[in-house]
Amino acid sequence: MLITEYRLELVIQALRAVLPLAHPADAALSHHFRSERTGSGERALIAETVFGILRHRAFLELACTAERSTPRRMALAYWVRFGGYNLRELTPLLKPTESEWLGQVKGYKMAELPLSIQAELPDWVIEKLRGSMSDEDILATGRAMQQSAPLDLRVNTLRASRDEVMQGLQGEKVEATLTPLSPIGIRVKGKPPLNKSPMFEGGKFEVQDEGSQLLGFLLAPKRNEMVVDFCAGAGGKTLLLGAMMNSQGRLYAFDVSEKRLANLKPRMARSGLSNVQPQLIAHEHDQKIKRLAGKIDRVLVDAPCSGLGTLRRNPDLKFRQSPTSVDELNVKQAAILAAAAKLLKAGGRLVYATCSLLPQENQEIVAAFLTAHPNFILLPAGEVLKQQKIPLEMGDYLQLLPQVHSTDGFFAAVLERQAA
């Protein structure tokens, strides 16, 4: 798209609204679009530029020099270095000194820059990852996180087969392939308006990252079981579990947010599920939870976390989180896991999962739980996946990385309660 003075000004206004990061970037940008009337073509350019700048912010602040990192300079530097524009295209917009400066921006040799800039990860994140990753792996992960995420769909097996949805997408002229790991996933090319698809409106698919779909197969709920989605949110995984149960048995969707549970209701209506019971709770010790103690077959704990595995979608999270916020999350994660474990009957299964890459939110939480709860054992995630006929080599834990698995960064542990 041709960059004009008008379009540059629109991008600058959006960056002023988003870059302070007083709110999540996607929410701030949505609010900005609602308050400013902008054409759909301009919206696409603005969104791509804003999120591109967030993905490459460390490099761009270096290239702009921190004290001169104005929205205008950030946008120009992004377009020249990462956005596919050449200097000649932008020359009509430039002030006298900007052409020479942008030539320097193009000339930076990335391999000579510090790891935090190459990987686009804050120093504190790199330090926490160094306990479990080499610098080479951190760099590969950081580079993968600088790419935008693919669009994955989960077929609602209660309403349709994967082949049926694939054929329907072809009929709608949507390019798609089967996901390599999830047997109910489809990966779509580009960003078609799928929310207008008759198949979406008919509940035949939902948007859900392939890695997130695999959590359902680790839990492997069966028909007629009692199952709990402990931190249900807007219910993406709840809907997956309900379909795996063929809408039989009972599936409780707990969450502390009334708004998130309200978002689940229209999705539930589309899905055709009748076995889901959304339940608003005040905290992990709510009476609604206590009355189910020892009665539940399977529990999914998709714990609140830093979200650092989702930087392809939410690049602002690396600036919105901090060592302190992760410490606070650890307290919450340990408390939620301990409370959720009380629900299980003997022989019951719990899956603890996060979309974080930090061992502090993952292995360390699970190890501390197992030490404090000797009546629980760890089931190797690789073995569970093999039982589900999912072709993925894993050890004790599920650990997904974007550069290896083309999914968000996910962690999961499968725990089983032993007879007393």
Image (spheres, helix red, strand yellow):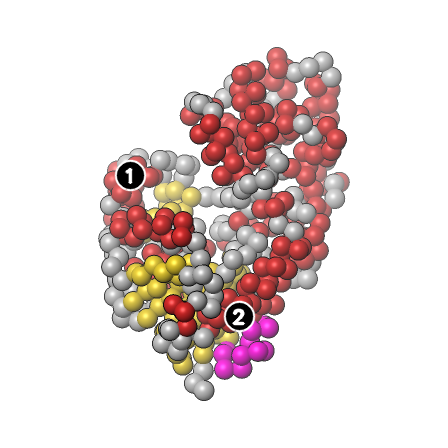
Residue 197 — which label? 1
Q: Position of residue 340 (x, y in %)?
A: 46, 70
Q: Position of residue 215 (x, y in %)?
A: 43, 61
Q: Position of residue 35 (x, y in %)?
A: 46, 27
Residue 396 — which label? 2
* 155 horizontally vs 115: left or right: left
Q: Nearer the viewer, mark 1 or mark 2?
A: 1
- What residue sits 45% from the left and 75% below the top? 342
- What residue sits 57% from the left and 20% below the top? 9
Q: Residue furthest bottom?
A: 420
- Relative to the observer, which residue lies in front, 379 or 164? 379
Q: Secondary structure at mark 2?
A: loop
- What residue sits 67% from the left and 58% below the top? 128
* 145 horizontally vs 258: left or right: right
Residue 251 — which label? none
Magenta-colored stretch includes residue 370: yes
- Is residue 178 depicted above or below 245 in this figure? above
Write the start and end of the magenta stretch as one range: 367-377
- Relative to the observer, which residue lies in front, 159 or 181? 159
Q: Do we see residue 391 in this rendering? A: no
- What residue sits 73% from the left and 20% below the top? 100
- Is residue 404 depicted above or below 38 in this figure? below
- Is residue 87 depicted above or below 262 in this figure? above
Q: Do we see residue 22 in this rendering? A: yes
Compare marks 1 and 2 and give the one earlier in the sequence: 1
Image quadrant of residue 346? Answer: bottom left
Image quadrant of residue 70? Answer: top right
Q: Secondary structure at mark 1?
A: loop
Within 10 Å of disc 1 (Cα), the crowding (few <14, some 14-19, many 20+) is some
Q: Amino acid at mark 2?
A: Asp
